[in-house]
Amino acid sequence: MGDGFFELVIIVILFLSSIPFIFQFKYGNRALWGWTKLPFWKICSVSFIGQFLITIITSTPIYIIAPKDGIYYIFYSVMIGILFSVFIIILILFQWMINKSQKL
């Protein structure tokens, strides 16, 4: 593809993959402190399902747009999705541990 296409794709993938992480950060804290009616486990489930769906959504059209180099973009999309999934797991553990230590 043309110049700058790869960078644009990576920026879009990074932006979209960060949405479930930001959602977990914002609403996970609210759920733990009782500021929302959704329980913490539902917020975590929504974050994981959202991360999975965004990884699929960002990797599928890439192969259609660039079939020759699309496999590399799909690899990057899946790796970024796995990376943000690990970030979400770490964030969930931090939120849960901080909440448990505050309630002692």
Image: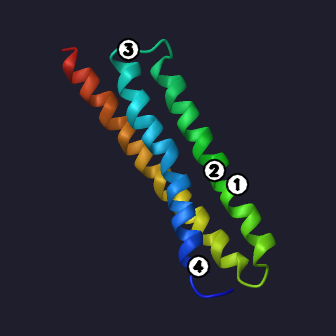
In the picture of the structure, the residue carrying the numbered disc 2 is 54
Q: Residues within 10 Å of mark 3 (few under 14, many from 20)?
A: few
The amino acid beneath tag 2 is Ile
Q: Residue at x 65, y 78 (%)?
A: 72
Q: Are marks 2 and 1 in contact (CB under 8 Å)?
A: yes
In the picture of the structure, the residue carrying the numbered disc 4 is 6
Q: Residue at x 53, y 37 (%)?
A: 47
The part of the image, by quadrant, that contains residue 46 is top right
In the picture of the structure, the residue carrying the numbered disc 1 is 57
The amino acid beneath tag 4 is Phe
Q: Is residue 19 left or right of residue 65?
A: left
Query: Which comes before the other along the chain, label 2 or label 3?
Result: 3
The amino acid beneath tag 1 is Ile
Query: Which comes before the other along the chain, label 3 or label 4?
Result: 4
Q: How many marks?
A: 4
Distance from label 2 to label 4 (Cα)?
18 Å
The amino acid beneath tag 3 is Trp
Query: Which comes before the other along the chain, label 1 or label 3?
Result: 3
